Amino acid sequence: MGKRLAIGAGLEFSWLLASVGLMREARGRGVVFTLHHVRPHVAQAFEPNAHLEITPGFLDAALRRLRREGYRFVPLDQVPALLAEPEGAKPFAAFTLDDGYSNNLEHALPVFERHQAPFTVFVAKGFAEGSHSIWWETLAVLLRQAPEIRFDFGHGMERLVLDSPQQQWHAFDRFAAYIHGSDEARAVAAIDLLARENGIEPTDIVRELVMGPGELQWLAAHPLATLGAHTISHRALARLPEAEARIEMQVSADYVEAVTGIRPGTIAYPYGTPAAATAREARIARNLGFTLAVTTQPGLPSARLTGYLPRISLNGFYQKRRYVSALASGIPLKLMGR
């Protein structure tokens, strides 16, 4: 909570600076936004993935605000060419959505249509086929429903009581650390087994949340939509052997091409952090023919980074129109020394 308050205060300060015309040089040529879920909010006491969810109303307000501030909405694959334009061109905004959630089709598409805003959805083959679980979604259901669980984090079986949101949050953080600090496939398999022992089928959650091949094919035919690759299993590529990382990336592109008839030129690295996506993954992406790769590392695109782009998150914790202005201004990044 303290971190969220600090970020919120930073966004308020950045908006104030931008509103009076200060630090205009921070804005850069444009911005690439990243989103995940777009759906009406259903409030719950324990919402570990709330940062990955914005409402359709906020997306609409964000697009209205950006348009009013002079941004042109562009497809992601046009960003490198736009970065090469002369100084003084209108700033651009590109929109990307990770993981291929069904609400991108149901709730996000009508908003993008209303504003004629192109967007890219990054597809993980294992999610679209229902063959791989989404561990953070599984945990949200499991920790919300089970009164207690038993799990071995590597030091023997432990009992975790889940009577309060605080206990649920503590458990979620422990599982996340366990996943990122051990063999990810084995860790996720262990969580899936725990969920099944508690009457929850992880792949049912995926099939409920994620677009299947038919929906992806329909979406790919829409003039505003483009599909990109997002690996098979959504594991952190930098922690995989190079050959396995390459397979994850290539097969994901093969899948999108098989479903839509169009080979994707873009890829989003799972998690997208510096620890999950390194120079090695950028090299593999180039060798596989991807012309553009995106991370979740906060930043504005520049001509120096056309093959390895940072993005700005439209975060569920900060759904205020003025925060969109603050984020697009680049001022928060300058204040952080980026």
Image: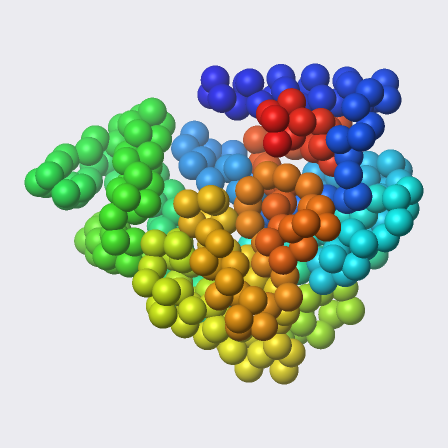
The residue shown at (91%, 42%) is 88
What residue is rendered at 81% in x and 40% in y?
66
Locate residue 58: give its quadrant. top right
Position in image of residue 24 (x %, y %): 82, 28
Question: In the drawing, does residue 221 fall left or right of residue 18?
Answer: left
Residue 78 in the image, given as x and y percentages of width and height: 77, 60
168 left or right of 248 in image: left
Mark yes or no: residue 269 visible. Answer: yes
**Does 200 sit left or right of 321 as displayed?**
left
Q: Nearer the viewer, residue 171 or 275?
A: 275
Q: Residue at x 46, y 51 (%)?
A: 278
- Which residue occupies the extreme left position in the image? 156
Residue 192 drawn above or below residue 173: below
Residue at 58 percent across and 79 percent down: it is 257
Which corner quadrant of the image does residue 123 belong to? bottom right
Position in image of residue 253 (x %, y %): 53, 73
Q: Is residue 262 above or below residue 230?
A: below
Specify whether residue 321 is in view: no
Question: Could you say where residue 338 lies in the image, as x and y percent from the top left?
Answer: 61, 31
Q: Residue furthest front?
A: 304
